[in-house]
Amino acid sequence: MAYQILGNEIIPQNVDDTSSTKKMGLGKKFQAKDVSSYAVSEFIYVQASNSIAQYDAVAIKPGYKIAPLTITNGKTAIEIGFSQIAIGTIGDYASVIQGGRPIVRVANGTQNNVPLFATATGGVLDDVSSSVVIQGVQTETVVTNSAGTATCVARFPTAHHEPPG
């Protein structure tokens, strides 16, 4: 997808790019429009602490470091995002979607309009219950292919889990 930055503020790194050099403050939020669908999404600028596959759900940790979302790091994630590009180099900087219409990796057979959960497979969400529900995100279609991606609607996604008791 190609995005057009919205607003008057200059954003020095395109949302479709990664960089080994920090171009703005980590945690910077801004909006961009998908030029083909006109969908507006909110992005946040982050740094990869692990390799990220395209369309991964990511856990945003302290210091705006991201890693593919799993059940384990979902329990301590401060925020959740969705990477629309692959970030292959640890330490690279990029922007991920936090609100809008991201494409997200989901397990085969995931139904639409149902709660989604973190899985043991990094970056992949599923409609099968785990201890970490991802609130504020739903798929729009049933996933029936092995590619395992779905367009979602995301509004302030957060990870919720029951504390050990």
Image (spheres, helix red, strand yellow):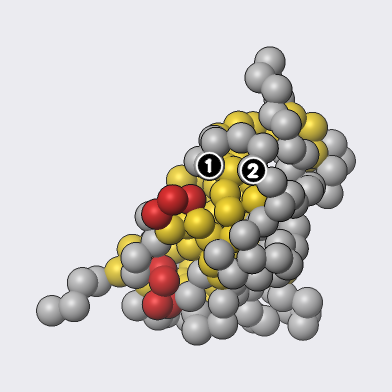
- Residue 130 in percent (x, y) is at 40, 80
Establish if 74 lies above or below 9: below
Which of the two discs, 1 and 2, sits closer to the camera? 2
User: From the viewer's perspective, is 156 left or right of 160?
Assistant: right
Residue nearest the viewer, comparing 77 with 132: 77
Query: Is the C-beta separation of discs 1 and 2 under 8 Å?
Result: yes
User: Could you tell me residue 144's position as x and y percent?
Assistant: 74, 78
Q: Amino acid at mark 1?
A: Leu
Q: Residue furthest left?
A: 165
Q: Does residue 145 appear to the left or right of 107 in the view shown?
A: right
Other residues around mark 2 within 10 Å, as few (<14) / some (14–19) / many (≥20): some
What is the quadrant of residue 150 in the picture?
bottom right
Q: Residue at x 59, y 43 (%)?
A: 45
Q: Residue at x 78, y 77 (%)?
A: 147
Residue at numbered disc 1? 26
Q: Residue at x 69, y 46 (%)?
A: 21
Whether residue 94 is visible here, answered yes or no, is: no
Residue for badge 2? 22
110 or 42, which lies in front?
42
